[in-house]
């Protein structure tokens, strides 16, 4: 219901420079101007080594450390939220980083707990825990308003993060967003798997 309510106050903004559609909502009003000013492609004259990102870790009390790479730059910042068991070194994550470098915008990519370079056990991971990972990145690393880019399952977590942090999320960009895939698969589960899968979907 919360996702549906959020959608009613959202506005679709065509965005040729990103190649996807962005959702604008909340009190922010400068995103249309930002998108209109973006170039159609990265300037070829920018040196590839102008900005560098190094692997860092976000320490959280009683929670696994999250591996991330951050590119400092202007606002709004962009956070890439990967798909199921995908890490921050995927093609989309790296391509968006190069795009942000060309425009001088801040950018964060990270690994979920139990995935990639982050601490944690994948077998103990749940959607609730990965949602906390996304919120930790927004709360503890991101500065100012953010554009969330969610890929596949990351799109589902992106929506939950936007609902939880409306004051920091100014826009959403979904890449093959699997917003309803989990619900569909959940409803198709055999009875004997219901309890086990409920733990994965809902456990914090």
Image (spheres, rainbow, N blue to C red):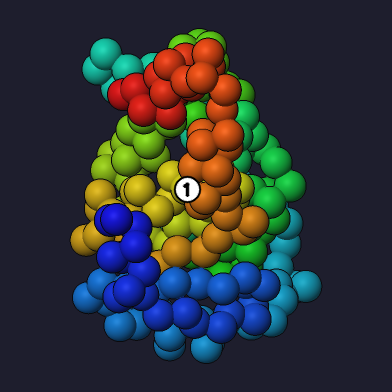
Rendered image quadrant of residue 73: bottom left
* Residue named by callout 1: 156
165 relative position to 12: left or right: left
Total numbered labels: 1
Residue 90: percent from left, percent from top: 70, 41
Judged left or right of residue 54, residue 167 is left
Front residue (pair 133, 182): 182
Percent across and percent down for residue 106 are 46, 58
Residue in front for this viewpoint, 120 or 96: 120
Quadrant in which the N terminus appears? bottom left
Q: Nearer the viewer, residue 34 or 54?
A: 34
**Image-based side of 50 in relation to 67, left or right:** right
In the rendered image of this protein, does residue 101 appear above or below residue 129?
below
Residue 29 in view here: yes
Extreme residue in the front direction = 191
Q: Position of residue 49 (x, y in %)?
A: 69, 52
Asked which secondary structure carries label 1, the reply is: helix
The quadrant in which the C terminus is found is top left
Does the image show residue 168?
no
Q: Is residue 14 above or below residue 87?
A: below
Residue drawn at point x = 21 percent, y = 61 percent: 167
Q: Residue at x 52, y 88 (%)?
A: 36
Label 1 neighbour load within 10 Å: few <14, some 14-19, many 20+: many
Which residue lies at the image location 43% right of the left edge and 16% below the top edge?
A: 195
**Position in image of residue 98 (x %, y %):** 66, 58
Question: Residue 136, located in which quarter of the rendered image?
Answer: top left
**Looking at the image, which residue is at 57% across and 54% down?**
177
115 lies left or right of 156: right
Q: Is residue 28 above or below residue 73?
A: below
Q: Residue furthest right?
A: 44
């Amino acid at each position: 219901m919360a996702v549906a309510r959020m959608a009613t106050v959202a506005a679709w903004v065509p965005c040729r420079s990103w190649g996807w559609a962005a959702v604008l909502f909340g009190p922010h009003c400068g995103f249309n101007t930002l998108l209109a000013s973006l170039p159609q492609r990265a300037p070829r004259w920018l040196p590839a080594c102008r900005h560098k990102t190094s692997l860092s870790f976000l320490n959280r009390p009683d929670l696994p450390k999250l591996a991330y790479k951050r590119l400092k730059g202007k606002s709004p910042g962009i956070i890439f939220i990967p798909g199921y068991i995908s890490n921050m070194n995927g093609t989309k994550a790296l391509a968006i980083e190069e795009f942000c470098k060309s425009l001088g915008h801040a950018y964060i990519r990270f690994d979920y707990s139990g995935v990639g370079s982050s601490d944690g056990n994948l077998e103990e991971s749940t959607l609730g825990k990965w949602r906390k990972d996304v919120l930790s990145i927004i709360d503890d690393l991101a500065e100012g308003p953010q554009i969330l880019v969610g890929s596949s399952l990351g799109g589902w977590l992106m929506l939950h993060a936007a609902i939880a942090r409306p004051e920091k999320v100014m826009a959403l960009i979904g890449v093959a967003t699997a917003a309803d895939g989990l619900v569909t698969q959940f409803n198709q589960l055999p009875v004997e798997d219901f309890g086990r899968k409920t733990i994965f979907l809902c456990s914090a």
